[in-house]
């Protein structure tokens, strides 16, 4: 899911940005959502703390409650992956953002060919996100690009016979088999069972006696087959 998060206090400019996003995304089959805010309020703070992946923030630098750079600072406290674009009528403030090392993609001036330049910047942001290592899957005629570093484990369900991709923030149920997904994954993933693939980076502890894998978020699964134990110990370790 690609998330566009707009914070702009002027309704006409906010609508202009939304229409621009709709135009850009119309020919794409990527699933996306647009969030709009008129100030740095509690709902926006909660959304930032939700730590969703694949975010493109478009923030006005002048807001009723203060500077849009304050929003950028809060994002960067815990999130260095989201893309931040600043819309401004004061281009000279770009120097302050650079000085504070907020890693902004661009400053777009509202009074200098705004639509064209913002469109170019959004397209660049989408390309940057697309280049991240991702698992590409299709579900209900929608293509999802799931960042590999967000995947905790992948499991084949026995009841619904769906493959479940469990990430740090949500789950995706798809029809593709485990063997198909395994070809798209890299060295951080290991198959622990014919019905399960796990991301080694999220493993907290392994109980080999009970075939239990505990992850960093304290969720767990019982999916270690006898034939996979040796490979698992070699690649992950003998955690007890």
Image: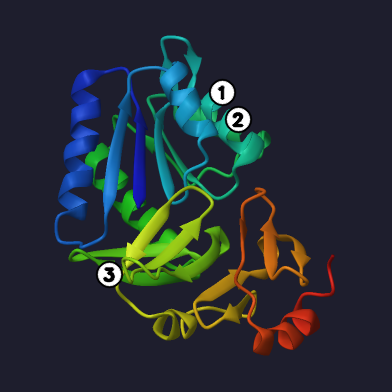
Task: Identify the residue under disc 1.
Answer: 70
Q: In which quadrant of the rendered view does residue 21 lie?
A: top left
Q: Nearer the viewer, mark 3 or mark 2?
A: 3
Q: Tell me if residue 64 comes above or below residue 57 in the rendering.
A: above
Name the secondary structure under disc 3.
strand
**Does the CB distance between marks 1 and 2 fall below 8 Å?**
yes
Q: Is residue 73 above or below residue 156?
A: above
Q: Which mark is residue 128?
A: none
Which of marks 3 and 1 precedes in the sequence? 1
Dot 3: few (<14), some (14–19), or many (≥20) neighbours within 10 Å?
some
Question: Is 158 on the left or on the right of 105, as rendered?
Answer: left
Height in image: 97 above or below 154? above
Residue furthest to the top: 64
In the rendered image, the quadrant that contains the C terminus is bottom right
- Judging by the rendered image, the residue that carries numbered circle 2 is 73
- At x 55%, y 65%, the residue is 153
Badge number at residue 138? 3
- Residue 236: name its quadrant: bottom right
């Amino acid at each position: 899911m690609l998330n566009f998060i707009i914070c702009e206090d002027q309704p006409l400019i906010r609508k202009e940005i939304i229409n621009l996003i709709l135009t850009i995304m119309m020919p794409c089959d990527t699933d996306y959502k647009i969030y709009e805010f008129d100030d740095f309020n509690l709902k926006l703070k909660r959304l930032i703390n939700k730590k969703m992946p694949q975010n493109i923030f478009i923030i006005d630098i002048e807001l009723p409650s203060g500077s849009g750079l304050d929003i950028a600072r809060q994002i960067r406290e815990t999130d260095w992956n989201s893309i931040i674009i600043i819309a401004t009528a004061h281009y000279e403030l770009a120097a302050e953002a650079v000085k504070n090392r907020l890693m902004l993609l661009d400053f777009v001036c509202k009074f200098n060919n705004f639509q064209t330049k913002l469109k170019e910047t959004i397209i660049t942001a989408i390309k940057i996100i697309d280049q991240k290592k991702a698992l590409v899957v299709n579900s209900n005629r929608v293509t999802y690009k799931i960042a590999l570093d967000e995947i905790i484990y992948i499991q084949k369900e026995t009841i619904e016979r769906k493959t479940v991709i469990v990430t740090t923030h949500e789950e995706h149920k798809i029809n593709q088999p485990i063997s198909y997904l395994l070809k798209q994954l890299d060295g951080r993933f290991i198959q622990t069972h014919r019905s399960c693939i796990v991301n080694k980076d999220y493993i907290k502890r392994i109980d080999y006696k009970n075939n239990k894998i505990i992850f960093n978020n304290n969720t767990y699964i019982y999916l270690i087959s006898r034939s996979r134990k040796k490979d698992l110990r070699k690649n992950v370790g003998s955690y007890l």
